[in-house]
Amino acid sequence: MTVIVTDTGFGPDTFSGIWTDLAPDADDGAFQDAVAQQQAIRIQFPAFSDGRGFTLAARARRMGFTGRLRAQGHVIADQYAMARRSGFDEVEISDDLAARQPEAQWLARANWRAHDYRSALRRTG
């Protein structure tokens, strides 16, 4: 089973549409095809240290992708704000990871718009 993480915390997977799954090393043709479909893209994170998925999400949004965008796999709570800022709508994690990093840890990063270095710089400048 998996847990879906959003700005409101943990929840079940309620999406019933069709996903286009992309690996972090997806070739450019597969990536552009997924973006052109404008439906739902799920980008795999094989390890928390592999940040290529963040780049793909940001690139998809810059190309005008407005569909659902989900990070799936080894994303940790500390990366949630980065996932949201790069364009992901939600994160899908395993039940094991949810047990190791409970909902409170994810919710602590849910106000991702207010807690980034750029907003801190604007307050001090």
Image: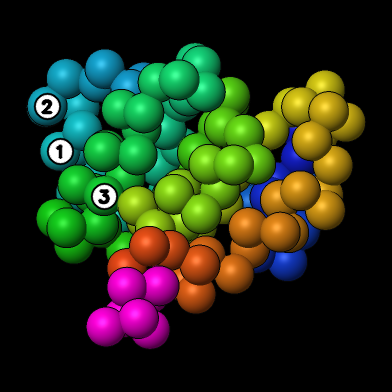
Secondary structure beneath dot 3 equals: helix
2 and 3 marks in contact (CB < 8 Å): no
Q: Amino acid at mark 3?
A: Ala
**103 or 61, which lies in front?**
103
- Residue 124, by quadrant, is bottom left
Q: Earlier in the sequence, mark 3 or mark 1?
A: 1
Judge whether 44 appears above or below 17 on screen.
Answer: above
**Within 10 Å of the Cα at label 1, are there few (<14), some (14-19), or many (20+) other Cα atoms?**
few
**Residue at mark 3:** 58
Q: Rounded to the nearest whole Å, what is the CA distance between mark 1 and mark 2?
A: 6 Å
Question: The N terminus lies in which quarter of the figure?
Answer: top right
1 and 2 marks in contact (CB < 8 Å): yes
**83 or 68, which lies in front?**
83
**Within 10 Å of the Cα at label 3, are there few (<14), some (14-19), or many (20+) other Cα atoms?**
some
The spot of residue 9 in percent (x, y) is 76, 58
Q: Earlier in the sequence, mark 2 or mark 3?
A: 2
Secondary structure beneath dot 1 equals: helix
3 and 1 marks in contact (CB < 8 Å): no
Give left or right: position of 114 versus 67.
right
Rendered residue at 34%/39% (across/down): 54
Judge whether 13 appears above or below 93 on screen.
Answer: below
Rendered residue at 38%/75% (across/down): 119
**Residue at mark 2:** 28
Secondary structure beneath dot 2 equals: helix
The numbered disc on residue 32 is 1
- Residue span colored magenta: 119-125
Residue 66 lies within the magenta run: no
The spot of residue 115 in percent (x, y) is 51, 67
What predominant SS class does the magenta segment belong to? helix
Q: Rounded to the nearest whole Å, what is the CA distance between mark 3 and mark 1?
A: 13 Å
Q: Amino acid at mark 2?
A: Asp
- Residue 85, by quadrant, is bottom left
